[in-house]
Image: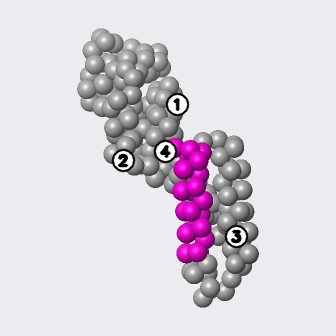
Amino acid sequence: MNNEKKLNKSILNKAVQLLAQRDHSSYELSQKMICFFAKKQQSTEEEYHDQLTKLKTEIQEVIEYCINQNWINDTHYIEKYIVIRANKGYGKYKIAMELKQRGLSIDLSRQLLQTSNINWEKLAYKQLLKKSKQIKSENNNKKQKFIQFLIARGYTQDDIKAAYDLLT
């Protein structure tokens, strides 16, 4: 029983250490800790699965504790992430895909992307202006290159059209 309490404390200490370095989503923190502690397990093949299940349960308890302490807040994490990636010139689709890959709620991400105070058309236009300096004016496929560039950056068709109209 005493050993179980100690393990939980080491999991909590690792969570606090990781959160002190930077913000993490609940999923991301959980994955990092499972990787970290699973490597330290010394068990036979028969024991491994049971120990891993126990470890995941203990990590989930620590994650819930961190959420209750407001050390982890997925909504705030998503809001900050959207701003950071938008400032780097990425559009809604790309950011939504990245958030999904980070194990965050698709619905929450979509909702926060819609309600963000970001002018996506203006962002797409700024990206086009930067790109237009790189593409030679005699290039026949200039429009197609611009559109492909913005699609790759994750902008919506509406944002791309608005940005292109501003450029021409």
User: Residue at position x 69%, y 74% from top?
Assistant: 4
Q: Which residue is mark 1?
A: 84
User: Residue at position x 60%, y 42% from top?
Assistant: 23
- Identity, as a three-letter code, of the amino acid under mark 3: Lys
User: What residue range appears in magenta?
Assistant: 52-73
Q: Nearer the viewer, residue 83 or 19?
A: 19
Question: Would you call the spot at circle 4 few (<14 residues within 10 Å), some (14-19), or many (20 or more)?
Answer: many
- Mark 4 residue element: helix
Q: Nearer the viewer, residue 45 or 51?
A: 51
Asked if residue 86 shows in the view, the reply is yes
In contact (CB < 8 Å): disc 3 and disc 1: no
Residue 36 image position (x, y, % from top left) = 67, 63
Magenta residue check for 9: no
Q: Which residue is mark 3?
A: 5
Q: Which residue is mark 4?
A: 74
- Quarter holding the C terminus is top left
